[in-house]
Image (cartoon, rainbow, N blue to C red):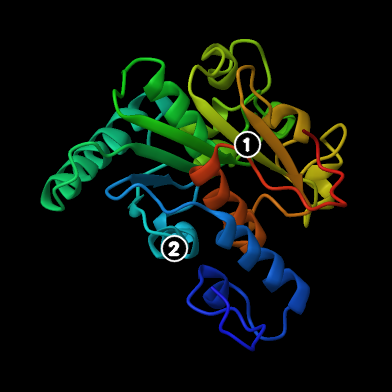
Amino acid sequence: MISPGSMTPMYSPCARLFPATVRFTHAIFCTLLLAMAIPAHAGDCVILLHGLAKSDRSMNKLEQAIDDAGFMAVNVNYPSTDFPIEQLAGPAIAPALDTCTRQASESAQPNHRVHFVTHSMGGILVRHYLSRVRVENLGRVVMLGPPNQGSEVVDKLGSFPGFHFIFGDAGLQLGSGKLSVPNSLGAANFDLGIIAGTSSINPILSSMLPGKDDGKVTVERTRLQGMDDHLEMPVTHVFMMKNPEVIAQVIHYLHHGQFQRRPDSTADD
């Protein structure tokens, strides 16, 4: 990962993730995280699902890093604002699972596992799908900023003119009430790691959220009963999936089933 006699990261996803102007220590931390990862099981597939009102392009940086780490990445594009969650989950995920199976067959890897990496509402699609369909070769799931208990932003803005036009039926389903879709899906019964952001670039939305938040979802509402690990990071909801250290943590979790803390980390365990 690091060339002899040099401290410049080589042949690592970190090399493409960090521009030269970024603090050197951050790049080294990212590289060390990836260096600690065990080799990926040949043929393992990672399905990526973007968030509400986004596209697969928002996950391109994460997709490339996951490919570089030795996995087969399948970056799904789905019409997040056109249909409710129950009509989005199956059509988005089932074809991606078929793609994983086909790729594994072509590479002669019949024992492949399928992992999921999601941003925001993408995690709710995975929860909805897994609550109804058993994936025999399911591996690990990593969710970035998921509204697992909904968001107060939807509670307060959902009835405003234009909200439904912009965010569709699915957006209205992400409230924090007991009958919202996220709160109706139950606990996780799969290997799950969650990263929550604690920084915001939207003070207006943050003013609607109690406690620490990423500008869209509070840290507390990212949590889900049954999760295996939860990590807070100083990143925003909108850009967390492009953050190099977040990406390094995602890859670490896919390999190890837990996040990596710095020795001085104050992140929750």
Asked if 16 appears above or below 33 in the picture, the reply is below
51 left or right of 45? right
Name the N-terminal-most of marks 2 and 1: 2
Instruction: Find disc 1 in the rendering and name its residue.
Output: 194
Q: Which residue does the image show at 84% across and 49% down from the upper left?
A: 265
Number of labels in the image equals: 2
90 left or right of 237? left
Q: Which residue does the image show at 73% across and 54% down from the upper left?
A: 235
Instruction: Find disc 2 in the rendering and name its residue.
Output: 60
The image quadrant that residue 159 belongs to is: top right
Q: Residues within 10 Å of mark 2 (few under 14, many from 20)?
A: some
168 left or right of 91? right
Alpha-carbon span between mark 2 and mark 1: 20 Å
- Which percent across, then down, holds residue 26? 74, 69
Task: Kindly state the secondary structure of the residue where label 2 is placed.
Answer: helix
Q: Is residue 158 visible?
A: no
- Which percent across, then down, holds residue 230? 69, 34
Q: Which residue does the image show at 43% across and 39% down from the upper left?
A: 116
- Which percent across, then down, holds residue 22? 73, 79
Please identify the quadrant where the C terminus is shown: top right
The residue under label 2 is which amino acid type?
Asn
Asked if 98 appears above or below 8 in the picture, the reply is above
- Which percent across, then down, holds residue 152? 74, 29
Residue found farthest to the front: 4
